[in-house]
Amino acid sequence: MSETSPQISVVIPLFDESGNVQPLIDEIVAALTAYAPVGQSYEIICVNDGSADATAEEVKQAKQKNPNVRLIEHGQRLGMSAAIRNGIRRARSTWILTIDGDRQNDPVDAPRLLDLAWQEGRDRKVLVGGIRVNRRDTLGKRLASRFANKIRKALLNDNCPDTGCSLKVFPRDSYLELPFFSGLHRFMPALLKLYGHECIFTPVNDRPRAHGVSKSDFLGRAVRGTYDLFGVIWLIRHTPAPDRGKEIA
């Protein structure tokens, strides 16, 4: 990255989030501008994942107000993992902060995650993830998430209590070394741990959805998640500890 690269690249996957875009961007700007290590040195990458509503237009309006906002368009819906991936590929910072587009994650928590990630001695090999407290989702969604997290922790031993929380901070290059598949965003702690990273988790606020509706399909996600889980287990067992080697003079 160049000397003019921002301190942090915020990546927001968006699918039919009209009404949430500008308020979320305003909250992110307020949180990062007040955070001394970042100040005005940030970019906000909004990835419109084939929305059929006014999401893209709202991002364009936000760009007119703030030049740090960028828009990536998908011609059709590719899914959250692809939206995150394409946003990160275009990011200009060495550090990534991901956050959900539904405003249930609270940007006020972002500086605390950045503080943990940027502590001295971590050598850029760290993921910091949020643990949602006082969940505002429906009972069914909370129970499904709790069950899935327990199964995943037992089989992957990733020590992640809430892999579904989108609020995360991690190095861009570390993420781009991971094999890509649909559902990757839910298995990042396990895979980054395999690649020698420390994973830290901290409580974060969870807010009720203000606009729009949840896109979750509990049954479909459970089926896909089971396939993904066993695929990740296979991947971990067949991936030796990465070794970049060293050049001999």
Image: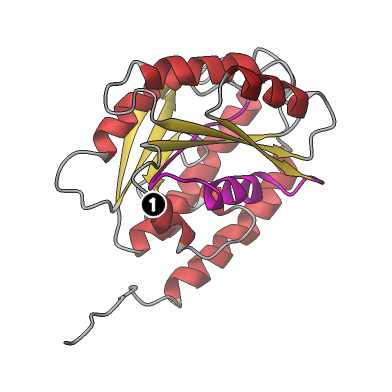
List the residue tagged with mark 1.
1
Pinpoint residue 169: horizontal percent, then vertical percent: 39, 40
When the figure is inspected, residue 220 is found, relative to residue 62, above or below; the finding is below
Q: Position of residue 147 (x, y in %)?
A: 53, 40
Residue type at mark 1: give it: Met
Please tell me which residue is depicted at 27% across the width and 51% down the height of the picture.
124
Residue 191, quarter of the rendered image: bottom left
One can see residue 148 in this view: yes
- Residue 16 in the magenta stretch? The answer is no
Seen from the viewer's position, the closer of residues 45 and 129 is 45
Residue at position x 33%, y 45% in the image? 3
Report x, y in % for residue 50.
79, 40
Residue that extends furthest to the right in the rendered view of this protein: 52
* Horizontal relation, residue 68 to residue 210: left or right: left
Q: Nearer the viewer, residue 73 or 141?
A: 73
Name the residue rendered at 38%, 18% in the picture.
Answer: 33
Q: Nearer the viewer, residue 142 or 102?
A: 102
Q: Residues within 10 Å of mark 1 (few under 14, many from 20)?
A: few
Could you tell whether 73 is left or right of 131 in the image?
Answer: right
Q: Is residue 96 magenta?
A: yes
- Looking at the rendered image, the quarter that the C terminus falls into is bottom left
Look at the numbered disc 1 and give the secondary structure of its residue: loop
Residue 54 versus residue 166: which sits nearer the camera? 54
Could you tell whether 232 is left or right of 201 in the image?
Answer: right
Task: Give the answer, above or below, for where 23 lies relative to 248.
Answer: above
Residue 134 seen in the figure: no
Residue at the (74%, 46%) spot, across then down:
220
**Image quadrant assignment for residue 248:** bottom left
How is this picture coloured? secondary structure
Look at the image and give the residue range highlighted in magenta.
75-101
**Horizontal placement of 202 versus 78: left or right?**
left
